[in-house]
Image (cartoon, grey):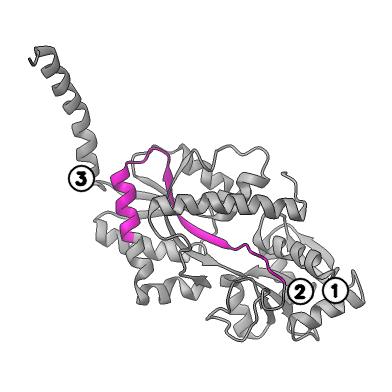
C-alpha cells in the first residue's frame, strides 16, 4: 500500500532533481569559461582557442579563453579546480600540469586526481633536440661523440626541472655517457633565445615552438623524442632509432572541476572529439603546432582517466630513475 508520506517523498525528490535535469538539457545557457595555464599564441593555446571558436557556433554560446599563467601552470589549475562544478568552467592542460607537477611539486594547492574530471585527450606534443645552425654537428651521433671527447664543454640550455626538455637532457646523459655544460635559464623563452643567439649550442624544446625556427634555418634538428618519425620532420631520426629511448611525451586535454555534470562532460567530449578527428581542422590548427593526433587510450572520459593513471605510474618510475626530487 502506497502511503501519503511516500508520495510526498517522491514528489520532493522529483522537485529537487528537476533543476539538475533542466540544467543539463539546456547547457550551455550562458558563456563558458576555458582556463588555459599556458601562454597565448603558443602551441598549447592555438588548438583549444580554435576549438572554442567552432564550439561556440555548435553550442550557441561563446567559450571565453582565459590564460592564467604562473607557477608552471599551478595558478591556472587551481583557478579551475576552485570554480563551481556547474559546467561553465573548463580547462585545457598539459601533463606538465596534471602529471609532472602532481609528482614533483611538494606543496600542490590542489589534488590533480581528486579535483578534476578528465574529459578528452586532444593530442601529443613531442620535443626536439636542436643545435644552433653555426655549430659544426649535423647529427645526434656527432653531438654525443663531441660531448664524450670533451666533457662539460658543449653548452646545453635548460629551463627548470619540471618540463619534458629537462627530462630528455638528463636521459641523454644517463643513457649515452655524454656530459654537456648545462646552462640553466629561468624560462623556456630565455633558453630558446639563447640557442638562437648562439649563447648555447644545444637545447631541447617543444616541437610546436621549435618548428618555425627549424624552417627558418636558424637551428638544426638532431633528433625527436617520439616513437616514430614525425610528419613535420620526416628526415629527423627519433632518439629511439639511435638507441636512446625516452618513453615520455607531453599530451594535452580538456578537464572540468570535480563534480561537473556528467551530461556536460559527455557533450564536451563528443564535440571536441569530432574536431580532433576532422582532417581539415586538425591539419590547420593541431598538426601545424607540432601535435600528433594519436589519443593513445581512446577518447572517452573513462579512457582518458585510465591513461592519466598509467602515465602517472610511468612518470614515477622515470623520476626515480633520473633521481629527481620534489621541490
Where residue 63 sits: x, y (%)?
A: 35, 55
Q: What element does badge 2 sit on?
A: strand
Where residue 262 sits: x, y (%)?
A: 32, 44
Residue 291 versus residue 159: which sits nearer the camera? 291
Q: Residue at x 64, y 53 (%)?
A: 315
Could you tell me how many numbered marks the image carries?
3
Quarter location, residue 176: bottom right
The answer for how far apart the CA atoms under marks 2 and 1 are is 8 Å
Which labelled disc corresponds to residue 25? 3
Q: What element does badge 1 sit on?
A: loop
Q: Mark 3 and mark 2 in contact? Answer it, CB < 8 Å.
A: no
Residue under label 2, please give it. Answer: 202
Q: Residue at x 42, y 60 (%)?
A: 298
Q: Is residue 271 left or right of residue 199?
A: left
The answer to whether residue 119 shows anywhere in this view is: no
Which labelled disc corresponds to residue 301? none
* N-term mark: 3 or 2: 3
Where residue 137 sits: x, y (%)?
A: 79, 85
Q: What element does badge 3 sit on?
A: helix
- In the rendered image, the quadrant that contains the N terminus is top left
Residue 85 versus residue 323: which sits nearer the camera? 323
Q: Mark 2 and mark 1 in contact? Answer it, CB < 8 Å.
A: yes
Quarter location, residue 293: bottom left
Look at the picture and state if 220 lies above or below 123.
Answer: below
Which labelled disc corresponds to residue 154? 1
Amino acid at each position: 500500500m502506497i502511503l501519503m508520506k511516500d508520495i510526498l517523498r517522491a514528489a520532493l525528490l522529483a522537485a529537487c532533481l528537476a533543476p539538475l535535469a533542466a540544467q543539463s538539457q539546456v547547457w550551455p545557457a550562458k558563456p563558458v569559461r576555458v582556463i588555459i595555464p599556458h601562454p597565448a599564441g603558443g602551441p598549447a593555446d592555438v588548438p583549444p582557442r580554435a576549438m572554442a571558436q567552432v564550439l561556440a557556433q555548435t553550442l550557441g554560446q561563446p567559450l571565453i579563453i582565459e590564460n592564467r599563467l604562473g607557477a608552471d601552470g599551478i595558478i591556472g589549475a587551481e583557478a579551475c579546480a576552485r570554480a563551481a562544478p556547474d559546467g561553465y568552467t573548463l580547462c585545457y592542460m598539459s601533463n606538465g600540469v596534471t602529471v609532472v607537477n602532481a609528482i614533483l611539486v611538494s606543496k600542490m594547492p590542489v589534488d590533480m586526481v581528486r579535483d578534476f574530471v578528465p574529459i578528452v585527450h586532444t593530442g601529443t606534443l613531442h620535443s626536439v633536440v636542436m643545435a644552433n645552425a653555426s655549430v659544426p654537428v649535423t647529427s645526434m651521433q656527432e653531438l654525443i661523440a663531441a660531448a664524450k671527447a670533451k666533457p662539460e664543454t658543449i653548452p646545453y640550455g635548460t629551463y627548470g626541472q619540471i618540463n619534458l626538455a629537462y627530462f630528455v637532457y638528463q636521459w641523454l646523459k644517463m643513457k649515452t655517457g655524454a656530459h654537456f655544460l648545462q646552462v640553466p635559464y629561468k624560462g623556456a623563452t630565455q633558453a630558446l633565445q639563447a640557442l638562437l643567439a648562439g649563447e648555447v649550442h644545444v637545447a631541447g624544446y617543444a616541437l610546436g615552438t621549435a618548428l618555425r625556427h627549424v624552417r627558418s634555418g636558424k637551428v638544426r634538428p638532431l633528433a625527436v623524442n617520439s616513437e616514430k618519425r614525425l610528419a613535420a620532420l620526416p628526415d629527423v631520426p627519433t632518439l629511439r632509432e639511435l638507441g636512446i629511448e625516452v618513453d615520455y611525451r607531453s599530451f594535452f586535454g580538456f578537464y572540468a572541476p570535480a563534480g561537473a555534470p556528467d551530461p556536460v562532460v559527455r557533450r564536451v567530449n563528443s564535440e571536441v572529439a569530432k574536431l580532433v578527428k576532422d582532417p581539415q581542422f586538425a591539419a590547420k590548427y593541431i598538426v601545424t603546432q607540432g601535435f600528433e593526433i594519436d589519443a593513445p587510450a581512446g577518447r572517452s572520459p573513462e579512457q582518458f582517466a585510465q591513461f592519466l593513471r598509467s602515465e602517472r605510474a610511468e612518470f614515477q618510475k622515470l623520476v626515480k630513475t633520473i633521481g629527481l626530487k620534489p621541490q
